[in-house]
């Protein structure tokens, strides 16, 4: 094999992505976005239905200084019992995932829900191995990757019910 300085650029570049793989990745990205949008919308509607003021914050939105912030993560456990950010393959994928939900008092400093684990080959990507924060209380709900709208509504109602019960049991836990 010739030295690296004599190798052509064509042998140093990765093979081109197959058109089918790019299309599948785009479909998975759209499906993941759809899951997040469905869950966020249903949680906000469930809180509003219960008589609470609720808004959806998006990246870059100003964070209020009172109330609660509800964060969520679609995750799955791999064969080695590692938590991973869920990988949404296609709309027809019927695998199981967990919806992890945390509640943060907005008058307190932020704490992360999870961090990307420092393991070889891991990166900030779908399917990355993660480490959940031991300091952020959270609840877990089982879910199908191809769940119908009704599943989102039921899970959102459970999230609201659980949070209301928590706030009623600990009225001083959140600034109002």
Image (cartoon, rainbow, N blue to C red):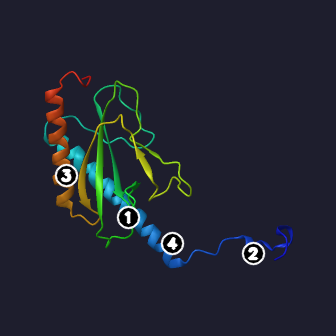
Q: Is residue 78 above or below residue 169?
A: below
Residue at 73% of width from left, 70% of height from top?
12
Disc sitting over residue 10 in the figure: 2
Judged by depth in the image, the label closer to the viewer, 1 or 4, is 1
Q: Is residue 63 above or below residue 119?
A: above
Name which residue lies at 20% across and 61% down.
149
* Earlier-in-chain disc, 3 versus 2: 2
Does the rendering let one see residue 135?
yes
Q: Nearer the viewer, residue 4 or 144?
A: 4
Q: Are marks 2 and 1 in contact (CB under 8 Å)?
A: no
User: How many numbered marks appear?
Assistant: 4
In three-dimensional space, the C-alpha distance between marks 3 and 1, rounded to whole angstroms, equals: 19 Å
Q: Earlier in the sequence, mark 2 or mark 1?
A: 2
Q: Mark 3 and 1 residues: CB-CB less than 8 Å, in contact?
A: no
Label 4 to label 2: alpha-carbon separation:
21 Å
| Residue 163, image x, y percentages | 19, 37
Position of the N terminus by quadrant: bottom right
Residue ID at (31%, 58%): 35
């Amino acid at each position: 094999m010739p030295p690296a300085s004599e190798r052509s650029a064509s042998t140093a570049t990765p093979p081109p992505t197959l058109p089918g793989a790019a299309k599948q990745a785009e479909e998975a990205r759209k499906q993941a976005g759809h899951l997040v949008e469905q869950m966020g919308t249903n949680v906000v509607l469930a809180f509003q239905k219960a008589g609470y003021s609720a808004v959806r914050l998006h990246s870059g939105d100003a964070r209020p200084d009172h109330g609660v912030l509800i964060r969520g993560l679609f995750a799955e456990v791999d064969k080695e019992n590692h938590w991973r950010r869920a990988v949404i393959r296609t709309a027809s994928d019927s695998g199981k995932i967990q919806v992890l939900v945390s509640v943060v008092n907005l008058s307190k400093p932020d704490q992360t829900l999870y961090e990307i684990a420092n393991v070889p080959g891991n990166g900030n990507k779908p399917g990355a191995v993660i480490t959940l924060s031991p300091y952020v209380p959270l609840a877990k709900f089982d879910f199908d990757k191809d769940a119908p709208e009704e599943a989102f509504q039921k899970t959102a109602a459970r999230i609201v019910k659980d949070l209301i019960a928590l706030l009623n049991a600990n009225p001083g836990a959140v600034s109002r």
